[in-house]
Image: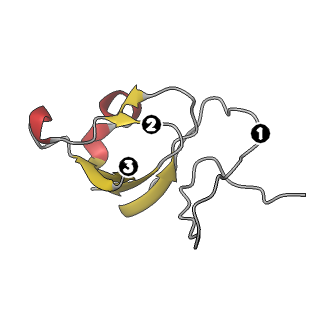
């Protein structure tokens, strides 16, 4: 029996070696995130890439950060779009979301 994970949470996994992590299960439907004021680490439990501004209620969001392809990316609804280096939620990544 494996570890049961919460699909709405983000997880940091530390490994001393490069390896493949296999996760089995079914894709959840209609996920609701309970976000607290301040920083929240969330997962993105979908197989589809979707724009952040269509996925979250951005009026309550201050910023979103993610470490993708060996660099930090960021999104803020208060910045012009061309300054946002993170525009989409991508399956398989965790996201730091700051709520106002």
The residue at which mark 1 appears reads as: 25
Real-space Cα separation, disc 2 to disc 3, in angstroms: 9 Å
Q: Is residue 80 left or right of residue 44?
A: left
Q: Residue at x 27, y 49 (%)?
A: 73
- Label of residue 68 in the image: 3
Q: Is residue 16 above or below residue 70?
A: below
The residue at which mark 2 appears reads as: 90
Q: Helix or strand or loop: what does disc 2 sit on?
A: loop
- Label of residue 55 in the image: none
Q: Residue at x 76, y 42 (%)?
A: 24
Q: Helix or strand or loop: what does disc 1 sit on?
A: loop
| Quarter of the figure with residue 29 | top right
Circle 2 residues within 10 Å: few <14, some 14–19, many ≥20: many
Q: Is residue 31 above or below residue 4?
A: above
Of 60 and 52, which appears nearest the observer? Answer: 52
Q: Earlier in the sequence, mark 2 or mark 3?
A: 3
Circle 1 residues within 10 Å: few <14, some 14–19, many ≥20: few
Q: How is the image coloured?
A: secondary structure
What is the x, y in percent for residue 66?
36, 52
| Quarter of the figure with residue 82 | top left
What is the x, y in percent for residue 13?
57, 65
Real-space Cα separation, disc 1 to disc 3, in angstroms: 23 Å
Q: Earlier in the sequence, mark 1 or mark 3?
A: 1
Q: Is residue 61 left or right of residue 24?
A: left
Q: Residue at x 37, y 48 (%)?
A: 69
Quarter of the picture holding the N terminus: bottom right
Of 43 and 30, which appears nearest the observer? Answer: 43
Q: Is residue 95 left or right of residue 33?
A: left
């Amino acid at each position: 029996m494996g570890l049961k994970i919460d699909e709405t949470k983000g997880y940091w996994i530390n490994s001393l070696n490069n390896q493949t992590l296999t996760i089995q299960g079914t894709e959840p439907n209609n996920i609701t995130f309970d976000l607290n004021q301040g920083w929240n680490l969330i997962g993105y439990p979908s197989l589809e890439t979707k724009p952040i501004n269509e996925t979250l209620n951005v009026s309550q969001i201050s910023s979103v950060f993610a470490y993708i392809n060996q660099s930090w990316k960021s999104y803020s609804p208060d910045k012009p779009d061309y300054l946002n280096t993170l525009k989409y939620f991508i399956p398989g990544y965790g996201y730091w979301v700051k709520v106002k």
